[in-house]
């Protein structure tokens, strides 16, 4: 049998099966089959004509028999594939705010997050000061030659100096955008709490306070008004 004849045979056989009212079975036709066989998948018929005869016999044999739900379901096409739901988008990164409630520019966030390094140094200095004071109170002979007054004073000054490395606020002069040209923040775009308190103008502080109040919906007097 030629290839196109084989295709036609298979299509026709499928049509014959689809018209069978009781879905009693399926008829197969294939090259190399035998019209003397049962027409099953394992032993198909050789010709479409033999399949047609078998189909008519099947119709006659199944006439009047009820059609079961199981038989219908067996011949129904598979349900369409449901498209997979798209994966939800990740939430936007949380906004990072400085000590005044002002958003930290994206390019400054890595530097802002390094404040933990400074805090670790301050914690170590505080522990050293605590240990020296304890040794002084207990008159520990190990530290008999230590000038406690000088050592504690220098540690206090080191603590104050190192704390200025800890960022507190986005620079109001350059807003962290052109920090390399800014003299207020010395090129880093961020200010320490000490520099914020001593070097930032009252007008800039008022602006920050009002901006924060607008963002949060909070009211009340500004820090300067509270002091007055």
Image: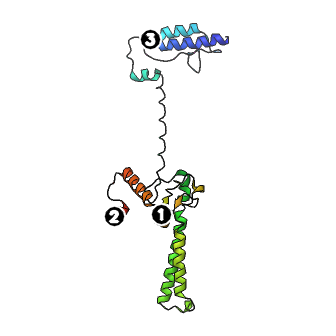
> SS of the residue at dot 2?
helix
Residue at the spot of label 1: 196
- Asked if 69 appears above or below 59 in the picture, the reply is below
The image quarter containing residue 60 is top left
The secondary structure that most of the magenta stretch takes on is loop
Q: How far across and down, in percent of the image, does residue 181 sit?
A: 59, 56
Q: Residue furthest right?
A: 2
Q: Which residues are magenta?
A: 21-31
Q: Residue at x 54, y 72 (%)?
A: 161
> Dot 3, crowdedness within 10 Å: few (<14), some or many (≥20)?
few
Residue at the spot of label 3: 61
> Dot 2, crowdedness within 10 Å: few (<14), some or many (≥20)?
few
Task: Say which label, 1 or 3, has the lower sequence index.
Answer: 3
Quarter containing the N terminus? top right
Left or right of residue 193, residue 218 in this image: left
> SS of the residue at dot 1?
helix
Q: CA distance from mark 2 to mark 3?
A: 101 Å
Is residue 116 at least partly visible in the picture?
yes
Front disc: 2 or 3: 2
Residue at the spot of label 2: 226
Q: How far across and down, in percent of the image, does residue 179 sit?
A: 57, 55
Q: Residues at badges 1 and 3 in contact (C-beta under 8 Å)?
A: no
Task: Say which label, 1 or 2, has the lower sequence index.
Answer: 1
- Asked if 89 appears above or below 72 in the picture, the reply is below
């Amino acid at each position: 049998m030629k290839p196109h004849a084989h295709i036609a045979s298979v299509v026709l056989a499928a049509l014959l099966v689809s018209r069978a009212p009781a879905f009693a079975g399926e008829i197969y036709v294939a090259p190399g089959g035998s019209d003397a066989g049962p027409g099953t998948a394992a032993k198909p018929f050789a010709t479409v004509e033999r399949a047609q005869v078998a189909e008519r016999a099947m119709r006659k044999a199944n006439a009047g028999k009820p059609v079961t739900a199981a038989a219908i379901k067996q011949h129904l096409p598979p349900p369409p594939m449901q498209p997979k739901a798209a994966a939800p988008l990740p939430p936007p990164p949380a906004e990072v705010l400085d000590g005044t409630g002002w958003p930290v520019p994206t390019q400054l966030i890595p530097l802002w997050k390094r404040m933990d390094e400074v805090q670790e140094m301050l914690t170590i200095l505080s522990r050293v000061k605590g240990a020296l004071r304890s040794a002084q109170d207990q008159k520990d002979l190990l530290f008999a030659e230590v000038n406690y007054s000088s050592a504690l004073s220098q540690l206090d000054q080191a603590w104050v100096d190192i704390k200025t490395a800890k960022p507190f606020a986005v620079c109001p002069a350059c807003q962290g955008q052109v920090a390399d040209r800014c003299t207020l923040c010395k090129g880093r775009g961020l200010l320490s709490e000490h520099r914020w308190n001593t070097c930032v103008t009252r007008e800039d502080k008022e602006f920050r306070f009002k901006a924060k109040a607008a963002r949060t919906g909070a009211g009340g007097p500004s820090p300067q008004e509270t002091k007055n």
